[in-house]
Image (cartoon, coloured by chain):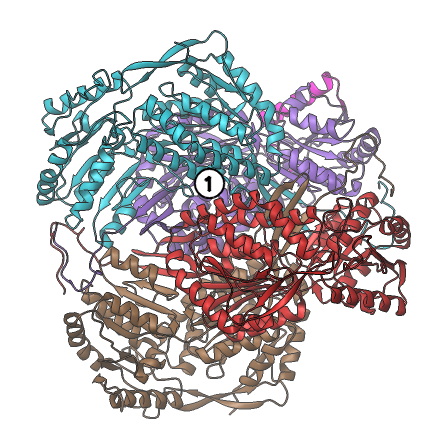
Chain colours: A brown, B purple, C cyan, D red
Amino acid sequence: MSNIIGNYVGGSTVKLNGGALQDVFNPSTGEVSGQVQLSTSEDLDEVVEVAKGAVSEWSRTPVGMRAQVMFRFKRLLEENADRIASTISSEHGKTHDDALGEVTRGLEAVDFACGIPHLMKGTFSEQVARSIDMYSIPQALGVVAGITPFNFPAMVPMWMFPNAIACGNTFILKPSERDPSVSLIIADLFKQAGLPDGVFNVIQGDKVVVDAILDHPDIAAVSFVGSTPVAKYIYSRGASSGKRVQALGGAKNHMVIMPDANMDQVVDALMGAGYGSAGERCMAVAVPVPVGKQVADNLMDRMVPLVEELPVGPPDDSKAAMGPIITRQSLERITSLLQSGVDQGAALLVDGRDLTVPGFEKGFFIGGSLFDQVKPEMDIYKEEIFGPVLSTVRADDYEDAINLIHGNPHGNGVAIFTRDGDAARDFASRIEVGMVGINVPIPVPVGYHSFGGWKQSLFGTHHIYGPETIHFYTRLKAITSRWPAGIKSGAQYNFPTMN
Amino acid sequence: MSNIIGNYVGGSTVKLNGGALQDVFNPSTGEVSGQVQLSTSEDLDEVVEVAKGAVSEWSRTPVGMRAQVMFRFKRLLEENADRIASTISSEHGKTHDDALGEVTRGLEAVDFACGIPHLMKGTFSEQVARSIDMYSIPQALGVVAGITPFNFPAMVPMWMFPNAIACGNTFILKPSERDPSVSLIIADLFKQAGLPDGVFNVIQGDKVVVDAILDHPDIAAVSFVGSTPVAKYIYSRGASSGKRVQALGGAKNHMVIMPDANMDQVVDALMGAGYGSAGERCMAVAVPVPVGKQVADNLMDRMVPLVEELPVGPPDDSKAAMGPIITRQSLERITSLLQSGVDQGAALLVDGRDLTVPGFEKGFFIGGSLFDQVKPEMDIYKEEIFGPVLSTVRADDYEDAINLIHGNPHGNGVAIFTRDGDAARDFASRIEVGMVGINVPIPVPVGYHSFGGWKQSLFGTHHIYGPETIHFYTRLKAITSRWPAGIKSGAQYNFPTMN
Amino acid sequence: MSNIIGNYVGGSTVKLNGGALQDVFNPSTGEVSGQVQLSTSEDLDEVVEVAKGAVSEWSRTPVGMRAQVMFRFKRLLEENADRIASTISSEHGKTHDDALGEVTRGLEAVDFACGIPHLMKGTFSEQVARSIDMYSIPQALGVVAGITPFNFPAMVPMWMFPNAIACGNTFILKPSERDPSVSLIIADLFKQAGLPDGVFNVIQGDKVVVDAILDHPDIAAVSFVGSTPVAKYIYSRGASSGKRVQALGGAKNHMVIMPDANMDQVVDALMGAGYGSAGERCMAVAVPVPVGKQVADNLMDRMVPLVEELPVGPPDDSKAAMGPIITRQSLERITSLLQSGVDQGAALLVDGRDLTVPGFEKGFFIGGSLFDQVKPEMDIYKEEIFGPVLSTVRADDYEDAINLIHGNPHGNGVAIFTRDGDAARDFASRIEVGMVGINVPIPVPVGYHSFGGWKQSLFGTHHIYGPETIHFYTRLKAITSRWPAGIKSGAQYNFPTMN
Amino acid sequence: MSNIIGNYVGGSTVKLNGGALQDVFNPSTGEVSGQVQLSTSEDLDEVVEVAKGAVSEWSRTPVGMRAQVMFRFKRLLEENADRIASTISSEHGKTHDDALGEVTRGLEAVDFACGIPHLMKGTFSEQVARSIDMYSIPQALGVVAGITPFNFPAMVPMWMFPNAIACGNTFILKPSERDPSVSLIIADLFKQAGLPDGVFNVIQGDKVVVDAILDHPDIAAVSFVGSTPVAKYIYSRGASSGKRVQALGGAKNHMVIMPDANMDQVVDALMGAGYGSAGERCMAVAVPVPVGKQVADNLMDRMVPLVEELPVGPPDDSKAAMGPIITRQSLERITSLLQSGVDQGAALLVDGRDLTVPGFEKGFFIGGSLFDQVKPEMDIYKEEIFGPVLSTVRADDYEDAINLIHGNPHGNGVAIFTRDGDAARDFASRIEVGMVGINVPIPVPVGYHSFGGWKQSLFGTHHIYGPETIHFYTRLKAITSRWPAGIKSGAQYNFPTMN
């Protein structure tokens, strides 16, 4: 196996000494496609040194010039989108179109970063007192790091580094060890775009490196996207070493279906949001919540045949609506949760287990599954399944639906389907969830707004990408200025001597 | 002569019927290089119809898609910068580097326009009263127009249309009839960038078309850059037909030199800001104001040999620091003003008249001139010369310099050269001029700030390009929303009947 | 008659020489209650001199201190609200509660102005190029003026002067000569609040003074609220003298009633918005637009008895829902328009003419009137009646309603009543009107948003009060700064000599 | 001793059961003036319950109404400033004028909070995709807490609660147990201002309560101001329970004196900033850094007599420039540090030990002390003395001064005194300190900017008060909205049935 996926440091890919290797799989075939370095904390120290060495020059590069790098990087990403998508699919398993979509959404953050000269303006107050001015300006933090999950190996890093770097920081990316290759393509494109060496770096690895990042005194801030327990750990440990941390955790996204909803839209929305990318999205809909028996019965009737016929296959199967699960362990966990649902009394209307994709018998595939009659105390409700499973919880009425959602520890995404302005406004205003869709099942904010959940779905004070990012990746400096009377005061043109 | 420069309407260049033609010259050779259409008001009506027809679709194109057109347009401008610069030089006469610089500065406005999704955000207030929300959003105006001067045939139009179009408006450009060709290159690049036909249009012509624009009921806003008398006329006539108007006029920019200034910098600054582009810039320094006799004498001593040796030549002469004047009439006006200065008692230390550039004897060339001992009542002080002439007015002290500037009707740009924080702060705060340079001779704001003078240098309420432009090219809509209780209120799922 | 209502200049009320006097009436009794000075252009010159003299000190008073004056002024307005309301009612005729409401809404602008230190921040960009910073700051314009209508003698002036003054300008108010007294109370409270003399001034008068204001070279900006023809005149004439102008004109506000609207709300909304303040509001609903015959028939059935029983009386009659019309001439104009409606074929379902209020037989009273079957070509549709008259135009469907509104030259306010999120969103997004209510009949923005119509309802580029006002009443100064290397560069501590 | 200082919960002061009591001293007399409750974690639970119960109603109170409470609170604070200042002085010891100044600076945050309707606006993007809108709105967090130090018992709490409460949160204040009384006055004034019970609460206590706050699952955010070790502890422990935390720590503020500084200003600045409030300010200047021997010698010569004559006395002694130290323990710690300076080789030019204030022999007084020749390795440089001691470190040149400051772990405040624009700009831009004064010794930002240090002086991502606070105390909700075609689509007016 010659495909060793190494670190990217100081403008080139390096095979650092001595780190162990871990297999990377193609989940469609179940075969090993490469091996990723598991870097040590010493490896990290070296990366940090490089990133630190690049801070001074990059942070003081005029902001307009930093923007030009982003403009070029955008173009290179567009030109290489197909190659990036293929790399994603080969390690993650999602369909090519889905992978392309991921790149497109990630690009939104690059577009936003191109506007950094406007976004990084400080504020100026003239004459706050007689002859005194005051201004507040954002400056770069220094070295910052991102730790990202397997499910969006291109997009989630792009939620972090374009704006971090545009702000003048240097960046260390620790991608998921499941699908690490795309990070090196990105690094290469950045270099082509004219980014100075040392500004964007990649360190491969697992928890060893994560801990080293969290503890390193010269890393000023850490961004993380992953599961809730890890997010909480990241937030706490990063804070212990005095860092800024934003740590996005898991989700259990509900979709409330009101009796006046357009059911064609509802069904389309649920199919896409529940089963797209095999449900491995933190914004996937996990829990349909039909309001009233009539709606629920109607919904289940319409969903069952669609879920049964949901096409599954490898990324290059253009008919496939979803691909395999990321790893065998994940597949087994999903299967086990499905069984727990049955055991605990939920109605498994469609059972996706035991699916076989011809020609890909060793791939990590599972079909779409649909539960009805799920109760909040069941494991399939309490756990984030992160697979192609919808767990329907029926609500008696609108307030019942609200209470269900408020009882859930997560607060990432939520949707309501209705035509009624009143229901939509009340829901959007009151619901304790960070991202709300009104007849939109996956309300991922556009790149000029920010993404973030509430409650156990986000630890820290900042949502990610968009305007929030600019604040997270900069620190304010407040300057108060007053001048002693000098050369302007009349006819004495020699400089006043020391008095 | 087959080079007819026509209008650009609805996505293609058209030779409209019946308009008269006017010669376009190459000012380096004095020869006619083409003929520009002088469109009629009927021609304008047709352009407006086309632009009007494109408003609805373009203004409702999602703002992120409009931004993508700008990103592509930026790239095309960069790729074609050399061609654009050559076209500018051939009709305007400025050096190739100066023309390239114009394109680069114009590009800043395109960069800014790429950030339109963030820039066009409205504001949302939840719960302004019980169950009532309010939000204010900017929307496009419709058809807007720009009327631009000869001295920056690429940059000044770019101060207008990129942001106007990004905001969702459709645009009609009326370029100067002295150097109209570059407008058609821009139009072509925009089309290549994917801009729908009818969104960007060019109408060639003179005052006939200007008046038609000002009076047309379907043009919502007009931006203008030119001389003060015309700017005032534009503002007044445009307002009479109910339009929004921003009209930037002339200038007489002073540069105050304090005794503690770095004189190397001062001399470099004056040479570039006074003679670059043959002084045909609204931000050119026209009036050096040395403070105190010692400074003045020193300054004149250092300037004289530099002005005497100032290299003048055609655009493709790489040694030339400046090129010809735009027209023979302008040249004669400058010559005449120089004579008036001599007649009225100023000291003409360097006389640029009667310069001949070998091989370009019919070109509209003049050398750099330098006056000392100018008084405010002389014509060379009162008139905007718009040529390569510095008219030094000596000030006794700092307050004398301030008073001189405040007595001038213009308030476009100004500079102070000093090391003293107190002098700089006091000057910047008190001086009644819109753009102030502290040790910067030509303080043209970067593209993410806005450009504009005060007093007779700008009529209207908005500076141009940058954040100001977004406000100028949009109108606010304020929406107050409240909903009657509906389907959410309990168990009744049928839609309430009319009560 | 000893009650002469004079000007307020330089901190005290003055009876200027020689101006003619004009009667001010109590419209409830029809009796003359005072006489207002009709100032001359010479009077104005004196006021401008005073206001100009106060600019320098006030504009350079630290912004936080200017805010403290606003805080005190707010308190004084609250403490004197009852007195102000009584004065309004005595000259305007509106009910006491309505007058108090006017004060309360006006206070919103004072509240907003208290936040001026934050609102007037400029923006600062560090390192726009190597060692170059740039910042843009808003500064006061100088002397500005407001010309206000009779219908809100306290609120509309407060839409202008609190923010104008907070920005550092000095202000000249020309109130309506119909109800001029409240302006002097305001002036007195401002003085008590610690506003320096000369910052807020009042000049009484008619068109003579209006023209003098528009032409005066030392007035930098004019705000106006009134009828459309006058607004257009103000805009044009003010622009001719180079001023900034915002001129708010008339209205013809439609209210679309969709079949799914809550009809109880609709009826309440129409009664209040149509007949409150006798319809003398630029945000009054003038044209109910029921969609579909069923809605229209139902609406008329419910409105007729309510309009017939609408209680009318003097301001101190606590049962009265509305008071008299401002003048006998206005009353006669309304009466005449009602007759034209009948003559042109509209169905006058309720006729308010010939109402007599016992004890107030000479008052300018008229009852509420209700038309059905109005057509767009009738005068009662084309004219702004400015009286207690609703002119119902029936629409066949939603697009028919949209087209009706788009055909009207005004674009001030509009409302839609519906429960449907889609209809509301489409309406709010597409309708060419500046202020939109969704189930809100009079969508006057709260004081931290801005007020303004589109089309013939506003001339200029700025809406009034709120954030728009800060921009209107300030001018940007852009400063670019660079420093020569000086004392910091090492061991030489003597100040560098001139080189 | 009957003066028991208890908690304020749910709108009234309560003496909670069983908590131990701790003496509160008058530091001028050394006598016990009262006893403060040391609350238990059970006490905290009760307070949190009350605060939690008030969240829903308060956070949904229209933002304009919340602002009105702040306007009234401001007035009451102004009216009671003298009483508040006296209470501060009696427990803290600072002079009456200094205490009044503290109230005035605290009021700035209340002024800012009055602008909350504007500050809490979200952003709205129309048409982010065809027929899709998106908006982001800030909403209150819920229950938040503040833990504040002894040195500004009124101002520092006001850095937190006015904006926290204006944002719609309910607040729990844990004041210093050294001077707890003023918190109850504030609570009472808030109630008078109309704040609903339960929105502002006070819990007295020590570390037991601090830990309970940090661990409580229903407290969403904690603000802290104190020493660096505690700040770090607060940040880490608060984060471990998933909270937002901003923790401001200690300081060691340098003041660089350049050779061209105005020495009169320098001396005045050092006296006030070094000895005011007995140096017990986190923004006190601790380390004068004269650049060059000449400056240093001159400075010491001028400072010595002034420090020797520095008047010290109790708060009601109008001639006193500073009062006593907060506790006997603090006094002893300062005395001991002074001795360490002498022992470690610094030159103690003025020794403030053994001062006696006649009539106040038991008060915790010490005189001003001045060190020269301090080295970075001495304890008096490394420790934050928090007493009236200046420790002069001489710098060879400008870069030497920069390096000294960059070597210090704190980054709270810093100042440079110079006339030179270049030195000031370079210093402000490069220095790694959060608050910079240019010829301003204590650059505390005005209330519409934000306060915060860098490095070990602040843990978290937000500075305090001003715009930063609004972000810290709210969480964003992002809403994406799309509507199915409904009632507007033509002639079908019955509501669409479920499809």
Q: Mark 1 lies on which chain?
A: C
**Where residue A326 sits: x, y (%)?**
39, 84
Q: Give the range drawn in magenta.
A: B323-347
Is residue B447 at least partly visible in the picture?
Answer: yes
**Where residue A205 sits: x, y (%)?**
55, 84
Q: In this view, does C429 lie to the left or right of B152?
A: left
Q: Is residue B95 left or right of residue B341?
A: left
Q: Say if D356 sits above or below B218 in the image.
A: below
Q: In this view, does B60 lie to the left or right of C218?
A: left
Q: Mark 1 points at which residue?
A: C111
Q: Quadrant of residue C413?
A: top left
Most frequent secondary structure within the magenta stretch: helix
- The one nearer the camera, A178 or B348, is A178
Q: Quadrant of residue A81?
A: bottom left
Q: Is residue B440 left or right of residue A256?
A: right
**Where residue B57 sits: x, y (%)?**
30, 48
Residue at far front of view? D1
**Where residue C81 sits: x, y (%)?**
41, 32
- The one nearer the camera, C462 or A314, is C462
Q: Does the magenta stretch include residue B340?
A: yes
Q: Does the magenta stretch include residue B243?
A: no
- The one nearer the camera, A50 or D303, is D303
Q: In which quarter of the image is residue C391?
A: top left
Element marked by disc 1: helix
Number of numbered labels in the structure image: 1
